[in-house]
Image: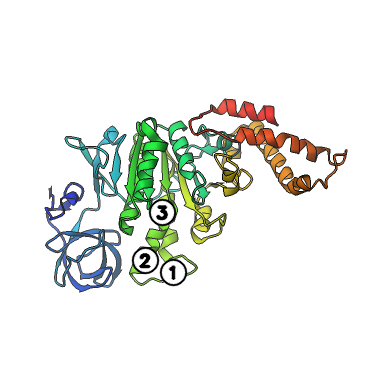
């Protein structure tokens, strides 16, 4: 038996449910960013209402009998002695296919339309990663419709891969192209820490009506609290798991996992945990728990595509370094390609899909390696070509053969935002080029 807590902030009423017989504690210290309460008995990640205004908080640390509580929104309404009531951490969202076409807040609130008379369901935010013995082998190709990915960086159904990119190199456009063209049953897209204008532009311009028809978008913008940004990433993953367990092949896209990690670091700093080398102790474990929830089970699959922000072309920052160790590959977008109007600006020589060899035919694998070899040899000798210091002779015949093929390869790797290609046609095309 349960009842909804009524509070001053009506938006929480629809999404937070609490048991009728509640656990209660009291605030005994109010700090600048967090509160300390004695009781109730809780675990890290539990959600509480505090005081007569029912300020929503999360338990972020526990010391003996004391809970450290961080509010979801900045508030001055919490006082010494206020009651602390433990509530359910489940989020209430539209049920089943009623989710499709919806843009949700981190609390499950429908943002892009009126949500009256829609059947609802409860979803748990924190599911454990797939157990090693329940994780199915990845054997099938996940077709994205993007030539450069399907030809040389082929992704498998249930794989998790990162898109590593700086700002302004076409990351959002690439995500939109994949969402519209990929052969997934359902897309779940999490936009974490993006500016409000960028969120609206992505939904309207990159996804459009075509992409939204089979998509659920979960949003926490940059002006929302760090807890809301963490919550948005977890809610999107939980929704993806729900559809996976219904037998679907789900595409989960998160933009960006860097903002998720930054939010976790900020929460840790709020409770006086100092970062070492740009990382806090919990950052790595939280990233692993989140990203390892993608994968393939007997019921269905989640193919995870996570964007990772990089400064310039530096792939060795704390978050990119962590992400590379967790993911099954990385797709690198280069600014130098974007400036040449080479879109998508994917540097295939700097990118890798660790599962590709296991899921494509030996013939396809051989063709991709040959194409990579041609690009690599040309890059090694590009300066000599520009300076005119390399002679075309029998000894350099293969180098000049590579030079003659590079223009055709680069033309093939480019793609317009509205273009889509079938996988078999892509493999046939690279055979003609090589």
Q: Nearer the viewer, residue 136 or 224?
A: 224
Q: Is residue 290 above or below residue 406?
A: below
Q: Quadrant of residue 434?
A: top right
Which residue is painted at 23% across and 40% down in the image? 121
Farthest residue in the right direction? 394
Q: Quadrant of residue 203?
A: top left
**Number of numbered markers:** 3
How far is mark 1 from mark 2, CA to CA? 8 Å
The answer to which of marks 1 and 2 sits earlier in the sequence is 2
First in residue order: circle 1 vs circle 3: 1
- Residue marked by disc 2: 268
SS at circle 3: helix
Is residue 353 among what the camera can see? no
- On the image, the x and y values in percent for residue 164 come to 52, 50
Q: Residue tagged by mark 3?
A: 289
Q: In the rendered image, which residue does mark 1 sit on? A: 275
Q: Are marks 1 and 2 in contact (CB under 8 Å)?
A: yes
How packed mark 1 is, by other alpha carbons closer than 10 Å (few <14, some 14-19, many 20 or more), is: some
């Amino acid at each position: 038996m349960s009842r909804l807590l009524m509070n001053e902030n009506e938006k929480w009423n629809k999404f937070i449910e609490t048991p009728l017989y509640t656990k209660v504690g009291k605030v005994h210290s109010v700090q600048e960013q967090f509160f300390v309460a004695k009781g109730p008995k809780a675990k890290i990640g539990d959600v509480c209402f505090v005081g007569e205004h029912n300020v929503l908080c999360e338990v972020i640390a526990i010391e003996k009998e004391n809970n450290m509580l961080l509010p979801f929104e900045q508030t001055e309404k919490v006082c010494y002695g206020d009651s602390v009531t433990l509530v359910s951490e489940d989020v209430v969202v539209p049920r089943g296919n009623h989710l499709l076409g919806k843009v949700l807040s981190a609390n499950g609130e429908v943002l892009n339309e009126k949500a009256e008379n829609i059947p609802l369901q409860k979803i748990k935010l924190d599911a454990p990663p797939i157990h090693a013995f329940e994780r199915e082998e990845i054997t099938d190709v996940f077709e994205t419709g993007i030539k450069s990915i399907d030809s040389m960086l082929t992704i498998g159904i249930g794989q998790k891969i990162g898109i590593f990119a700086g700002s302004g190199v076409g990351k959002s456009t690439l995500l939109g192209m994949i969402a519209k063209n990929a052969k997934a049953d359902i897309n779940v897209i999490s936009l974490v820490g993006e500016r409000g204008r960028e969120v609206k532009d992505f939904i309207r311009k990159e996804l459009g009506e075509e992409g939204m028809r089979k998509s659920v978008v979960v949003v926490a913008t940059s002006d929302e609290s760090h807890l809301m940004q963490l919550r948005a990433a977890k809610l999107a993953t939980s929704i993806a798991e729900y559809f996976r367990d219904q037998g679907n092949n789900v595409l989960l896209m998160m933009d960006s996992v860097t903002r998720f990690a930054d939010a976790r670091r900020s929460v840790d700093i709020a409770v006086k945990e100092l970062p070492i080398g740009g990382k806090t102790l919990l950052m790595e474990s939280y990233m692993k728990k989140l990203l390892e929830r993608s994968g393939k089970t007997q019921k269905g699959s989640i193919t995870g595509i996570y964007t990772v922000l990089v400064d310039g072309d530096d792939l060795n920052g704390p978050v990119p370094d962590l992400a590379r160790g967790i993911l099954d590959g990385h797709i690198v977008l280069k600014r130098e390609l974007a400036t040449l109007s080479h879109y998508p600006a994917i540097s295939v020589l700097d990118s890798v899909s660790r599962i590709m060899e296991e899921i494509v035919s030996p013939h396809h694998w051989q063709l991709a390696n040959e194409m990579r070899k041609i690009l690599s040899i040309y890059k090694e000798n590009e300066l000599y070509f520009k300076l005119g210091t390399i002679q075309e002779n029998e000894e350099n015949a293969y180098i000049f053969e590579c030079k003659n093929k590079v223009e055709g390869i680069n033309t093939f790797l480019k793609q317009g935002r509205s273009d889509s290609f079938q996988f078999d046609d892509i493999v046939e095309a690279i055979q003609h080029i090589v």
